[in-house]
Amino acid sequence: MVSGTNIMKGYLNKPEETAEVLRDNWLYTGDLGYLDKDGFLFITGRKKEIIVLSNGKNINPVEIEEQLLKVHPVVKEAGVFQDGDRLRAIIVPDLKVYGEQDFANIREYLRQNVFQPYNQSVVPYKMVLSFSVSTEELPKTRIGKIQRFKLKDMASEPEARNENEQQVKLEEYQIIKHYLENEKKMKVMPSHHLEMDLGLDSLDKVSLQVFIESTFGIQMEITDIVKFETILALSEFVHSHKLKQKAEKINWSEILKQKIHLKLPSTWITGNVFFKLSKVFFSIYFRFRPKGHKNIPDDSPCIFVANHQSFFDGLFLASLLKFKLMRKTYFYAKEKHIRNPFVKFLANRNNIIIMDLNHNLKESIQKMAEVLRKKRNLIIFPEGTRTKDGKMGDFKKTFAILSRELNVPVVPVSISGAFEALPKGSFFPKPFKKIKVEFHQPIYPENHSYDSLSDLVRNKIERNVDVA
C-alpha cells in the first residue's frame, strides 16, 4: 500500500477499476513481498499471479521459479503455471551447462537433477508434477516479467508424442495404467514417472505395491518399484516376471488382518513423570491452554489426529493425557530419526513404536493396526512433517484407513500458536506465546470413505486452528 502526493487520482473514466485499487487515499499496488531483518523490502511477485488450488492452498509461482533456478545451473529460465489442479513448469535449459549430451535426453536429465531434488524439499502441494522443455525464451513484458498467461499454450505437448504413447499394446501396461488413473484421477502415459509425473506419496506407493502383488503375484519392495524411470519400464518388468494375472482392488481389510509380530514397548513410569513435568514447564514458559478433555473416549481405543506445527507437538499432546490414558497411548517414529542407540533405548521404553516408512510401509500400517486391536491408542500427525509457513499441509489417509477398517473413532486435535513459538528451523522456543491444544468430539467412521473421513477430520482441525 502506497500513499503520498505522487499517487494518481484514479483511472480515467473507470470508476470501478479505480475503486479496486484506491481506498482511503491508499493505492493497493498488488505487489507481494517481505521485509528482511534489516528492514529492506523485497518484491516477490504480483497478487493477481497467485495460484489458488482446489484445496484452498495459495502458491506464489515466482517463489517456486526462484527455487528451481537455484537447484541446478542447467536451468536458465523457469516459468510455473497452473494446469488443472497441479503445478506445471516450462524450463529453458542452459545448453552450455548441459554440454554435448544428446538433447533428446534433456527431460530425463532435468527430471533427475532438478525436479526430483526440488520436489523432495517441499510440501506436496508445492510439487511441480509436470514440465515441458523449450529452446525459446519465455514470453516477457518490456520490463522483464514473465507473461504467465501465455505459458499454458507454449507448453502444449506435441500431438505426435501422445499418439505414439497411445499405441502401447502391452497388456500389463494397460492394467497398471487403468489402476493408476483410477487412483490418481488423471491421465497416465507410458513415459510418466511414478513420483515426478504422478506425484505418488508413500501411501500411494504401498497401494501400488499391494496391487502388483495381488494382480501379478510379484513381491517387490517399494524402493525397487520407484527405481523404474517410466510406467512402461515397470510394466515390461512385470510382464517378464509375473506369476499370475488377475486384476483386483486393494483390500485394506485383508491386509490389516494379516498376522504380524509386534511387541509393544514397555512403559516406564519415568516417561509419565516427564510428561507431567513438561506440562508444568509449558504452563510457565508459554501461555499453555488445553481444552476439550471431555471429548476423549474412556471405553474404546481411538486415534488422536493433530496438525503439526512444531517439534514440541507430540509432547504437548502427551502432557495433557492422564497417567492411565498415556500408558496405553503410542506414537510412531520414523526409523531414520531413531538411529542413535541411546535415543532408540529411550524410545523402546516410552511408548514409541519405531517404523521404517521408506522400506516397509505396508508392515508399518499393519503394526499400527495391531496397536489398535490391542485396545491401545495412537497419536498420528498425518501431514508427515512440520509446517514451514504455519499453514496446514495435505493429510495422508493412513489414519482414515485404520479408522474405517477397524471401526475406531478419530479424535481431531487442533494445535495453535506452536509455529509462532518454535517455527521449523529455529532452535529455541519464544517465551510467553499463547499455545492452544484442543481435543474435539470424536468422529466415527461409519458411512465414510477413506477420502471423506480424511477430509472431514482435516477440515475440523483447520477451522479450529487460530491464525496468528
Image: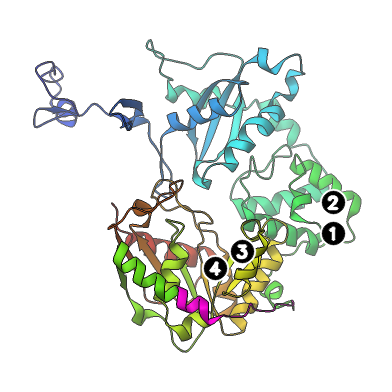
Q: How far apart are marks 1 and 3 (CA)?
A: 37 Å
Q: How far apart are marks 1 and 4 (CA)?
A: 27 Å
Q: How far apart are marks 3 and 2 (CA)?
A: 41 Å
Q: Which badge, 2 or 1, comes first in the chain's sequence? A: 1
Q: What element carries label 4?
A: helix
Q: Which of 387 and 49 is in front in this view?
A: 387
Q: Are marks 2 and 1 in contact (CB under 8 Å)?
A: yes
* Mark 1 or 4: the one toward you: 4
Q: Tell which circle, 1 or 4, labels the residue nearer the N-terminal end.
A: 1
Instruction: Depth check: give the residue in front, 442 or 160.
Output: 442
In this view, the residue in front, 442 or 436, is 436
Looking at the rendering, the stretch of residues picked out in magenta corresponds to 260-274
**Residue at 48% over, 80% down:** 326
Q: In this view, does 267 lie above or below 240?
A: below
* Residue 238: mark in rendering: 2
Q: Which mark is residue 218?
A: 1
Is 88 placed above or below 276 here?
Answer: above
* Residue 360 horizontal side relative to residue 184, left or right: right
User: What residue appears at the point 38 percent right and 50 percent down from the top-left corner?
Assistant: 390
Q: Name the residue under label 4.
A: 399
Q: Mark 1: which secondary structure?
A: loop
Label 3 SS: helix
User: Which x, y percent locates residue 59?
Assistant: 42, 38
The residue mark sitting in front, 3 or 2, is 3
Question: Mark 1 is on which residue type?
Answer: Ile
